[in-house]
Image (tube, helix red, strand yellow):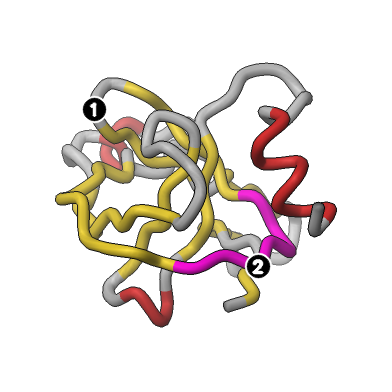
């Protein structure tokens, strides 16, 4: 299954500016970010993740909610502490990785490179 990046985007009606949030979720105390163009296979359901509210415009009323929950799925060949898939069903799940900085974990790089 091929996955592309997603995120929330908000624009004002006046066309003067646009802001967006990266797709991030929290699972078992770790933050995961989406990674585009990865072929992966979902192997089973893990539970739920929390997607925090998008605070891209700095307004407190938009961020007072606790976020939304989504299903979390295991990804074949990767431990859940490294990568999971997130979505309403395995077929529409987005590939997300727990990492910091700009360097992906080596096992995720291998999956992307097809090695």
* Viewer-proximal residue among 62 and 109: 109
Relative horizontal placement of residue 54, taking residue 49 as reference (left or right): right
Q: Secondary structure at mark 2?
A: strand
At 49% across and 68% down in the image, what residue appears? 41
Q: Is residue 28 positioned above or below 6 on the image?
A: above
Q: Which residue is mark 1?
A: 28
Question: Of circles 1 and 2, which is in front?
Answer: 2
Quarter residue 114 falls in: bottom right
Q: Is residue 48 left or right of residue 41?
A: left
Q: Which residues are magenta?
A: 35-41
Say few, some or many: other residues with alpha carbon within 10 Å of mark 2 (under 14 / 14 to 19 / 20 or more): some
Q: Position of 13 compared to 49: left or right?
A: right
Q: Which residue is mark 2?
A: 39
Image location (x, y in percent) of residue 38: 68, 61
- In the picture, the quarter occupied by the N terminus is bottom right
Q: How many marks?
A: 2
39 is within the stretch colored magenta: yes
Where on the picture, by quarter, is residue 110? top right
């Amino acid at each position: 299954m091929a996955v592309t990046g997603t995120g929330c985007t908000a624009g004002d009606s006046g066309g003067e500016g646009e802001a967006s949030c990266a797709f991030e979720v929290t699972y078992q105390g770790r933050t995961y970010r989406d990674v585009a163009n990865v072929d992966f296979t979902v192997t089973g359901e893990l539970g739920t993740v929390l997607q925090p509210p998008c605070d891209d415009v700095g307004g407190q009323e938009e961020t007072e909610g606790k976020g939304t929950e989504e299903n979390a799925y295991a990804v074949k060949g990767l431990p859940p502490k490294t990568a999971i898939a997130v979505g309403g069903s395995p077929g529409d799940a987005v590939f997300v990785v727990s990492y910091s900085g700009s360097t992906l974990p080596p096992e995720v790089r291998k999956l992307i490179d097809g090695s």
